[in-house]
Amino acid sequence: MRLKNFLLATLMFTGCATTSVERHEPGLFSVRDYLKTAYDTLLVAETDTDGHRIRAQLETKAALEALDDAVPVRRVPFSGPPTMAVALELLERSEQETTQNVLAQTHTRRAAAELRQALTARK
């Protein structure tokens, strides 16, 4: 049983360590692209016991709704499994770009804070 837990923990940490959003030229993807990819990632990401992922998901959805764009959305590519760490990185990138929309930026910051708490609680 201990070996199984060790292997699962090793696999989880390896996945988190190798997962990251690919680097792109600034402006290649829109704020909506980053937020939508973060939202989709949170739909399938691992769960946490305190509900941070769900709250982050709701805040991300609210940020998307606050943007109110009719622009087509593209998926932002990333390597590794869809985890809360990936969603956090996507949210952090979109947070920097949402300065024109205070409501979207507020929701994005709240979502990122929830994910930081979830990831900190795991350590």
Image: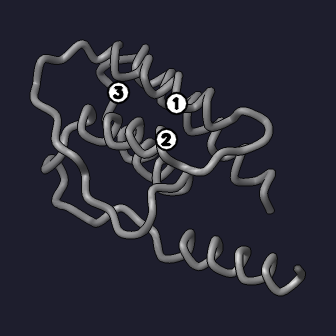
Sequence-first tag of 2 and 1: 2
Sequence-first tag of 2 and 3: 2
Q: Are marks 2 and 3 in contact (CB under 8 Å)?
A: no
Sequence-first tag of 1 and 3: 1
Left or right of 121 on screen, residue 31: left
Q: Secondary structure at mark 3?
A: helix
Quadrant assignment for the N terminus: bottom right
Q: CA distance from mark 2 to mark 1?
A: 6 Å
For this orientation, the residue located farthest to the right is 2
Other residues around mark 2 within 10 Å, as few (<14) / some (14–19) / many (≥20): many
State whether residue 120 is above or below residue 1: above
Residue 52, quarter of the rendered image: top right
- Which residue lies under the disc numbered 3? 99
In the rendering, at what x and y percent does residue 103 appear? 43, 14
In the rendering, at what x and y percent does residue 49 appear? 79, 41
Other residues around mark 1 within 10 Å, as few (<14) / some (14–19) / many (≥20): many
Q: Are marks 1 and 3 in contact (CB under 8 Å)?
A: no
Q: Is 47 in front, or is 31? A: 47
In the rendering, at what x and y percent does residue 105 appear? 43, 25
Q: Secondary structure at mark 2?
A: helix
Q: CA distance from mark 2 to mark 3?
A: 23 Å
- Which residue lies under the disc numbered 1? 57
User: From the viewer's perspective, is the residue at label 1 or at label 3 nearer?
Assistant: 1
Q: Amino acid at mark 3?
A: Thr
